[in-house]
Image (cartoon, rainbow, N blue to C red):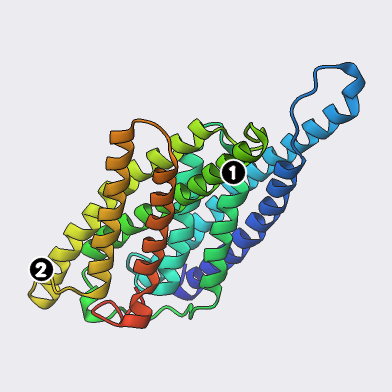
Amino acid sequence: MSSETLARLSLYGYFVAGAILAVGLILGWAGLVGSETAPTHAKHARHAESYVSAWSATGVAYALGCLGLLALTVSIAARGLAAGRPPYANQYEFAIAFAWGALAIFLLLRRNANALLPPVLTLVLGVLLYAGTLPSEITPPVPALQNRLILGLHVGCAVIAYGANGVAFVAACLFLAQLAIRRRTGHTSRRLPDLGTLDDLGYRAVMLSFPMLGTVLLLGSWWSWVAWGAYWSWDPKQSATLATWLLYGAYLHSRAVRERQGLISAVLLIAGFGATLLTYLGNLFFGGLHSYSGL
């Protein structure tokens, strides 16, 4: 298969994934909004039908999420084969990989948290829409990015870390929503996972992202030495990655000390994802050694 055919296949995979996930998003939100507590009396049969329909919509949305992940995988793999290198060399490629990472990690960690799927799909589609605004042409990488081994490892770890941080962010937002509902009504919403499930999901996501971010820093320092002769240059992206890693370290410390779910932990997760986005996009505004690729 020629490089041109593979490049077209990659674009088709991107558009197909977007379409599938958009349908999944609509069904997921419909299922979440329409879900009710299972009725216990026959006279509530109409409500029972509504309940079953809502959860059926959620189940279909989950299946579409899996299909969308498959389409994104095809898109990324075809892009890498067409380019002859790891498909992470520019902002467009990383955006698609970022979306893939968030969706894959959620599907891996979800554990009876299907209600998180619509917010996660919202995040994933937002990143994919952003990718659609970027140049998608395959171009040769600049000399600093021609080390395929370091490129694949360094940016691949960042994909996992960013995706996990996105999942933790969604879990933290819903955690705060549940807290607000409980304070207003005296009980949490049955439509959303309970506070313990949300707290646990955020924690497990950060337990994945924290070592990945540390590996990104170590590999980045090694790459900096190979490319520019210095392990650390206080490049804006280097510094922002370090700050983000320390912020998630503070979250893990807070959770270990408190030994219970809490407002502070959720706020730290939201702040951590804000720092992640700043790390991802900040070099577009502040320049630095990463500005040549948009990464």
Farthest residue in the top direction?
A: 41
Q: Quadrant of the C terminus?
A: bottom left
Q: Nearer the viewer, mark 1 or mark 2?
A: 1
User: 6 or 143, which is in the foreground?
Assistant: 143
Residue 282 percent location from the top left of the image: 36, 74
User: 232 or 73, which is in the foreground?
Assistant: 232
Residue 109 percent location from the top left of the image: 46, 38
State the residue at coordinates (43%, 61%): 97
Farthest residue in the left direction?
A: 229
Residue 8 visible somewhere in the drawing: no
User: In the image, 8: left or right of 118?
Assistant: left
**Mark 1 crowd level (few <14, some 14–19, many ≥20, 10 Å Cα):** some
User: What amino acid type is highlighted by mark number 2?
Assistant: Tyr
Residue 48 visible somewhere in the drawing: yes
Whichever of callouts 1 and 2 sits on the residue coming sooner in the sequence is: 1
Residue 34 percent location from the top left of the image: 77, 41
**Mark 2 crowd level (few <14, some 14–19, many ≥20, 10 Å Cα):** some
Query: What is the C-alpha distance between the residues marked 1 and 2?
Result: 46 Å
State the residue at coordinates (89%, 17%): 42
Element carrying mark 1: helix
State the residue at coordinates (25%, 54%): 246
Marks 1 & 2, CB-CB < 8 Å contact:
no
The residue that disc 1 covers is 180
The residue that disc 2 covers is 231
Element carrying mark 2: loop
